[in-house]
Image (cartoon, grey):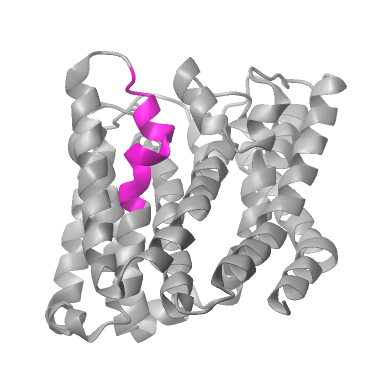
Amino acid sequence: MVLWLHFVQQYLPPGRGSWLGWLRAGTGLSWAGVDLFFTLSGFFIGGILIDQRGSPRLIGVFYLRRAVRILPIYYVTLLVIAAAIFWHLPGSYHLFPAWVYALFLSNFAFALAGTWDWLPLSVMWTLAVEEQFYVTAPWIVRAIPGSLIPWLAAGLAALAELARACILFAGPSGHFAMHVLTPFRMDALALGVLAAWAVRNEAAEPFFVRLRAHWRTWLVLALALLGGLGLMQPSWGSPALALFGYLLIAMVFTLVILIVARLRPPGLCRFLASRPLAHLGRHSYFIYLWHGLLGGVLIRWVAGPDFTLNTLSGFGIVALAVGATWAAAAASWKWFEGPLVAWGQRH
């Protein structure tokens, strides 16, 4: 979804005069791929913490494995971006000092400024939210009784909704901050943790009995609501998103995760387990970090700053950008990220 947003959707001609214009309008919600990332992160990280909450090595092992997975390629990426800016790569610029990104504070910088930075730097805000989640989640899960985890997760999701509503009604400023600051986006993370608890706890079995009987209807309805939200084309931090949109997106993705993780529909699982999607998933972190730097710069270099995606050759340029980013991701995993992750798993 993020690749579609940055490589395709933004280059499609605007307006409803052609099918390409309708495609642009109809896929305007593709930025919500980062919300799926948050929900998945809450599910996977929450599951790890719930499973290991009684282990005396939980904190140390968790931070070690997260560090070797996240930090090396992150800081390598920042160094390459810094070099690109220093050498005045076409289209490169920066609005905030390097320490903002090095300390995973870019979401605060964006919120204060009310704007994004250069695309390769702008995508770092989700990593900032993720690291802020990592800092707090292990200690909270370790400290509270296991029976309180679902109540806390549901309460944090509700609190995020309430916080957005308060900011919305407090005044006209600060709406962009709702899109990037962790307290306003923690409903996606919290619902992911709630899903992780549900698939592990017998108390949630009555819910799964109902879900098993009606999941197709629920899924169609959820996707229809998501499609309706997309057609509204809400902007980041808009009233529609603040009051119901962000929570709706998080709930839809949580439903999808629960269906896949617990019900495991054969057709859907075969599709998700297909080799291209599995390969994309394995390399998704590098692709996310580098797509704006490698693919985005390649598009600008080949097609120029006024590129519009309305010809077959234009789609060929996009395919080249995706292929180059994906190939670089595979190489990084084989020779850099993969060995580091394997080392972390042994400790």
Give 217 or 312, whichever is nearer the viewer: 217
The residue segment tinted magenta is: 174-188
| Left or right: where 45 falls relative to 225 | right
Decide whether residue 180 is among the magenta residues.
yes
Quarter of image, res 78? top right
Q: Determine the residue positioned at 28% across, 59% down.
A: 153
Give the image location of residue 183, x and y in percent. 36, 39
| Left or right: where 47 falls relative to 84 | left
Give the image location of residue 71, x and y in percent. 71, 51
Give the image location of residue 176, x and y in percent. 38, 24
Q: Is residue 295 above or below residue 279?
A: above
Q: Determine the residue positioned at 16% across, 60% down.
A: 221
Q: How many numbered marks have been drawn onto this rendered protein structure?
A: 0
| Left or right: where 168 falls relative to 90 | left
Q: Is residue 143 above or below residue 56?
A: above
Is there any visible trace of residue 89 in the rendered image? no
Give 84 or 304, whichever is nearer the viewer: 84
Is there any visible trace of residue 134 in the rendered image? yes
Quarter of image, res 32? top left
Decide whether residue 281 is among the magenta residues.
no
Give the image location of residue 64, x and y in percent. 67, 64
Q: Determine the residue positioned at 19% across, 79% down.
A: 204
